[in-house]
Image: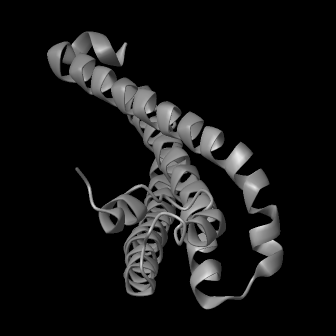
Amino acid sequence: METPETTSCAADDGLDEITRETTSEAEGVSEGQQEICRYYRFTFSVVIVGGLCVAGTVGNALALAVLRPFKETSKGSSGRAATALILSALAVMDALVLVSLLLVKSLPSLFYFSHVGEGYLAISPYLWQWGWPLNDLFHAYSTWITVLVAVQRCVAVTFPHRAKS
């Protein structure tokens, strides 16, 4: 059986942190346990997830910057242009996944922990309603674009002379 401390921290994914904070006293969670959960949420949601989202978005922007000239100079070679186009689409989808995750996971936790951004917390339920489904959609697109890259590379390696024509 899980302890209330484990249940309140592990079950919380940022969806309704304010509600969980006010109802945790009724569940028998002490003030010290609530403070540990707040720091856990901050460390995981803001520092780790937020940092990875920012670093990943910067990486995807760099990938787009590198792929753009490559895509423009390889007009004569359809294989190179196709690869650059697919990888650019993958970078865009991955960036959208990371930005939407930042909006629905990291920012609400940051504002909740720092007690600023009450306006953002007021619109947070709407972001949850639309943000997570969009995040899932972008993630699914990213997955299928990765499959497309794998198939395209498999065809290019298996049939190198037929793939170019």
Vertical position of residue 161 compared to residue 33: above or below? above
Residue 77 can be seen in this image = no
Q: Residue at x 54, y 47 (%)?
A: 72
**Residue 132, x across and y down, in percent:** 61, 45
Q: Residue at x 64, y 41 (%)?
A: 134
User: On the rendered image, what quadrant is the C terminus found in?
Assistant: top left
Of residue 98 and residue 16, the one placed in the foreground of this image is 16
Vertical position of residue 75 compared to residue 94: above or below? above
Of residue 157 and residue 15, the one placed in the foreground of this image is 15
Vertical position of residue 133 compared to residue 55: above or below? above
Residue 115 can be seen in this image = yes
Question: Residue extending furthest left?
Answer: 158
Looking at the rendering, which quadrant does residue 151 occupy? top left
Whether residue 10 sits left or right of residue 153 in the image: it is right
**Residue 157, x across and y down, in percent:** 17, 23
**Residue 129, x across and y down, in percent:** 72, 44
Q: Residue at x 75, y 55 (%)?
A: 125
